[in-house]
Amino acid sequence: MSFGLNRAEVIGRLGADVTISNLASGGRVANMSVATDESYLDRQSGQRIDKTEWHRVVSFQSGLIDMLEKHAKKGRLVYVAGKMQTRKWRKDGEDSDRFSTEILLVPGGRVQFLDKPAGTNGNGTAPANGDDAPAAAASTETGSIPF
């Protein structure tokens, strides 16, 4: 009997607005890039080294794509949970294969925005009277969470 666990979780900032593409089959696909940052002290120089790692995130789920289209904007802090997938393809006219490893958002996966959109009070509207209080807690089936 064989079994395994394929799960990936990242918290980071979106490097660009989500990209939505139409497929020949009639469906849609959402692509995002999430940057995670870490730092460490270099033993030799004693200086702090900052490192950014980029993660590709993909979803084919129509409800999730609709939510991402509205909320997944550059700079937003996001939590993503899905499974790792490596795709292989070959470009026309090239002799070698190309590979892309990404986090695939499958049913049971999760996307949560951990901040509120810039210039809003968390529900998509401008704050009233300069009040910048978070919106009331709410959760939706598409994976959006309170800000």
Image (cartoon, rainbow, N blue to C red):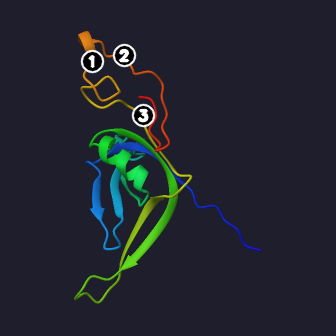
Residue at (53, 52) in percent of width and height: 109
Q: Quick one: which residue is furthest to the front in this view?
A: 26
Mark 1 or mark 2, which is nearer the start of the sequence?
Answer: 1
* Rendered location of residue 100, percent (x, y): 38, 69
User: How busy is the neighbourhood of tag 1: few (under 14 within 10 Å), some, or many (20 plus)?
Assistant: some
Of residues 93 and 45, the one nearer the viewer is: 93
Residue at (24, 26) in percent of width and height: 119
Kindly indicate whether the residue at mark 1 contacts the one at mark 2 (C-beta within 8 angstroms). Answer: yes
* Rendered location of residue 22, percent (x, y): 29, 65
- Residue 112 in the image: above or below residue 126: below
Residue identified by numbered label 3: 114
Q: Disc 3 residue type?
A: Leu
Total count of labels: 3
Mark in front: 2 vs 3: 2
Q: Disc 1 residue type?
A: Pro
Residue at (38, 31) in percent of width and height: 115
Q: Disc 2 residue type?
A: Ala
Residue identified by numbered label 2: 133
Residue identified by numbered label 1: 127
Looking at the image, residue 76 sits to the left or right of residue 3; the answer is left
**Disc 2/disc 1 C-alpha distance (Å):** 8 Å
| Element at label 3 | loop
